[in-house]
Image (cartoon, rainbow, N blue to C red):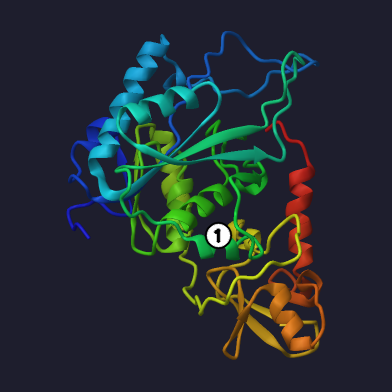
């Protein structure tokens, strides 16, 4: 690893200027959430005439598409220089900008591996009722050099998705509730991304110890995912209020314990709307936590970093291991129990799943 890198730090300033100071071919992955250039012409109001909290910050304002394209080419070129030949880049955007970003990516000889659709389970309604509700954003995943060996943790993605191959449509809610950072009661950042989204991106395409760069660091979601997964990170941000809160946020994040066990042979499991791995992505459970098989059996298993359970040399999914131990077809959601630190009582892990599903069903305009 290049010791000249400012690892695990937020650098304050313009990302293009800061990137020029990093060594060439020193970064394993870039995740970028650039300005969307929303082109808002006037205030957005609900039917009751209340004001919608939209993106009105000066950093999202460009005088023309040409200016935005110049900006995009500059930061993408700077990121390309610092990426290793085996490196990959993720960029997220809405219909306002993602097609322009994709064109510039291809102009700069990036090779697109996937586009992933983040489908928001609780999107903001179109209050004027003149268009479809914008319920998704698009992520482009591209490699620096076509044909180079890149990281894709296929088995990890299967493990986080009930042993099914993960698809390119990801159902995740907007960043709401306790996760949403606020200042004086208002949203700190208008486009803060959910931690579950970044957890999945980094778990899919980086290895422990890799260096992840975020040139538009914002409130530090990329840093949180990197810390939890044992990756190094470099954040770049020019807005002081975001930097202050991001540093405070990251000070409280601890790495997930590395208790990853041997991989079992993948097998098809019953299709459940929410995979067990989502409880790790959302932070409700962590690798190293202990689950009990029933409230009184005394049988305990440890959660691995891949979202499996491990017990006395046996490793399996929540359903598979419960079935092996009980000699019957089991439902892991109701058979495995976790201990709630709030009252020190045992509850089925389905309680946590229902908490997430309930939050996804709620429509929020935060």
- In terms of image quadrants, where is residue 353? bottom right
Q: Is residue 2 above or below residue 303?
A: above
Q: Position of residue 270 (x, y in %)?
A: 76, 65
Q: Residues within 10 Å of mark 1 (few under 14, many from 20)?
A: many
The residue at which mark 1 appears reads as 157
Q: Residue at x 70, y 73 (%)?
A: 318
- For the point 18% across and 58% down, which residue is it? 3
Q: Position of residue 26 (x, y in %)?
A: 23, 50
Q: Vertical placement of 345 versus 181: above or below?
A: below
Residue 14 in view here: no
Q: Quadrant of residue 32?
A: top left
Q: Residue at x 49, y 27 (%)?
A: 98
Which image quadrant: the N terminus? Answer: bottom left
Residue at position x 68%, y 32% in the image: 135
Residue sticking out furthest to the front: 147
Residue toward you, 31 or 147: 147
| Image location (x, y in percent) of residue 163 | 63, 65
Q: How many marks?
A: 1
Work out whether residue 280 or residue 138 is closer to the camera in this orientation and state it: 138
| SS for dot 1 | helix
342 versus 141 height, above or below? below
* Residue 240 percent location from the top left of the image: 38, 34
Q: Quadrant of the C terminus?
A: top right
18 displayed left or right of 251: left
**As drawn, 282 above or below 256:** above
């Amino acid at each position: 690893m290049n010791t000249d890198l400012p690892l695990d730090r937020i650098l304050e300033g313009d990302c293009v200027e800061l990137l020029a100071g990093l060594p060439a071919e020193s970064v394993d992955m870039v995740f970028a959430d650039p300005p969307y250039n929303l082109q808002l012409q006037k205030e957005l109001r609900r039917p009751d005439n209340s004001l919608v909290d939209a993106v009105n910050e000066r950093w999202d304002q460009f005088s023309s598409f040409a200016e935005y394209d110049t900006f995009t080419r500059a930061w993408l070129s700077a990121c390309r220089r610092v990426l290793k030949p085996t490196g990959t880049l993720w960029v997220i955007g809405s219909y306002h900008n993602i097609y322009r970003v994709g064109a510039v990516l291809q102009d700069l000889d990036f090779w697109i591996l996937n586009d992933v659709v983040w489908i928001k389970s609780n999107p903001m309604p179109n209050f004027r009722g003149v268009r479809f509700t914008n319920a998704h954003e698009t992520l482009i995943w591209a490699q620096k050099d076509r044909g180079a060996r890149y990281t894709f943790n296929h088995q990890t993605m299967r493990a986080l998705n009930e042993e099914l191959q993960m698809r390119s449509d990801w159902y995740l809610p907007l960043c709401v509730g306790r996760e949403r950072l606020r200042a004086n009661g208002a949203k700190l950042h208008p486009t803060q991304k959910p931690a579950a989204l970044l957890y999945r991106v980094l778990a899919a395409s980086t290895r422990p110890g890799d260096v992840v760069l975020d040139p538009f660091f914002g409130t530090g979601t990329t840093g949180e995912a990197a810390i939890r997964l044992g990756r190094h990170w470099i954040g770049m941000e020019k807005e002081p209020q975001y930097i202050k809160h991001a540093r405070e946020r990251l000070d409280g994040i601890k790495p997930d314990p590395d208790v990853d066990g041997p991989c079992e042979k993948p097998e098809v499991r019953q299709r459940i709307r929410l995979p067990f791995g989502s409880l790790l992505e959302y932070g409700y459970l962590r690798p190293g936590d202990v689950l009990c098989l029933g409230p009184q059996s005394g049988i305990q298993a440890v959660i691995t970093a891949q979202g499996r359970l491990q017990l006395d040399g046996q490793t399996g999914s929540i359903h598979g291991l419960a079935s092996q131990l009980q000699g019957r077809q089991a439902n892991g959601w109701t058979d495995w129990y976790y201990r709630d630190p709030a009252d020190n009582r045992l509850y089925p892990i389905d309680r946590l799943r229902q908490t997430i599903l309930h939050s996804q069903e709620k429509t929020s305009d935060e």
